């Protein structure tokens, strides 16, 4: 049953991904993206290092708008890894009108500090642009989804099973506005509600430096209403990165 649920979630996104891939290879495309990178390094009495990277790609063709996201976070303190998270996601949107669209997505995330080896999610549904001006917009998405989480060996031995699967209600709210000629504010909230609530909020402020180069400050909050034993419900992440748009 679990394998069928996962296969169903992936199959919902495959037509979007296949269509996008074919267009990209053909070269008939509208393509844009953003690349982010932030890093710190200290040596001497205190030895720490951290790296945050993100690549966000968008591909548009006719009624199709597809997005691909790759994120990575790695932190080390005195030769001890204190944070490690990798995320790979893809979403395809099919426009029904200027304000309405259908979506399907699939995401893969690795975060060993949560007690899971990896998490695989998929969702499909309806999206709507509630308003749009020359400087701002507000989007909302809702639909059914599925989450599959594979436990690490320690948690699997403790709990007596090695994975969890749940059907969820998937919702997204995205807001963006220009606050000046050289700065913009972004807020994105994602929630999956089923056997428990998994939510993610990202608040970001971006200021242009020169040309396509900008500075981005972001605060990310992740919430799990039922974390595994000895794990916390809320994780926060604060980043300052350089962003290049192309």
Image: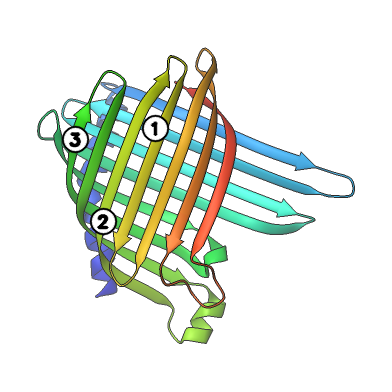
Quick one: SS at disc 1?
A: strand
Q: Tell me the residue that label 3 is attached to.
A: 130
Element type at marker 3? strand
Q: Earlier in the sequence, mark 2 or mark 1?
A: 1
State the residue position of label 1. 57
Q: Quadrant of residue 68?
A: top left
Along the line of sight, which residue is nearer the eye, 220 or 106? 220
Number of the label disc, if any, that sits on residue 170? 2
Q: Residues within 10 Å of mark 1 (few under 14, many from 20)?
A: some
| Sequence-first tag of 2 and 3 | 3
- Decide if residue 243 is on the left or right side of residue 164: right
The answer to whether mark 2 and mark 1 are in CB contact below 8 A is no
- Number of the front mark, 2 or 1: 2
Give the spatial CA distance, label 3 vs label 1: 23 Å
Identify which residue is drawn at 52% across, 85% down: 158
State whether residue 17 appears in this view.
yes
Nearest to the eye among marks 2 and 3: give it: 3
245 left or right of 125? right
- In the figure, residue 62 lies in which quadrant? top left
The residue lying toward the viewer, choosing from 169 and 91, is 169
Residue 114 rendering spot, x and y as whole percentages? 52, 66
User: CB under 8 Å between callouts 3 and 1?
Assistant: no
Q: Upstream in the sequence, badge 3 or badge 1?
A: 1
Can residue 18 be seen by looking at this rendering?
A: no
């Amino acid at each position: 049953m679990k394998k069928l649920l996962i296969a169903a979630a992936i199959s919902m996104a495959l037509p979007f991904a296949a269509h996008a891939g074919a267009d990209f290879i053909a070269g008939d495309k509208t393509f844009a993206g953003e690349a982010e990178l932030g890093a710190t390094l200290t040596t001497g009495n205190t030895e720490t290092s951290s790296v945050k990277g993100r690549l966000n790609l968008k591909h548009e063709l006719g009624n199709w708008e597809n997005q691909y996201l790759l994120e990575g976070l790695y932190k080390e303190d005195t030769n001890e890894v204190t944070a490690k998270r990798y995320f790979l996601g893809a979403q395809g949107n099919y426009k029904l009108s200027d304000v309405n669209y259908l979506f399907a997505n699939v995401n893969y995330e690795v975060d060993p500090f949560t007690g899971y080896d990896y998490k695989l999610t998929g969702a499909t549904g309806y999206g709507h642009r509630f308003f749009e001006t020359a400087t701002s917009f507000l989007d909302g998405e809702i639909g059914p989804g599925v989450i599959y989480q594979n436990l690490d060996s320690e948690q699997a031995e403790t709990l007596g099973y090695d994975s969890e699967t749940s059907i969820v209600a998937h919702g997204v709210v995205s807001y963006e506005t220009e606050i000046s000629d050289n700065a913009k504010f972004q807020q994105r909230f994602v929630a999956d509600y089923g056997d428990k609530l998994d939510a993610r909020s990202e608040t970001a402020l971006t200021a242009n430096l020169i040309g396509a180069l900008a500075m981005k400050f972001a605060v990310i909050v992740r919430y799990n209403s039922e974390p595994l034993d000895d794990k916390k419900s809320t994780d926060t992440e604060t980043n300052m990165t350089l962003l290049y748009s192309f």
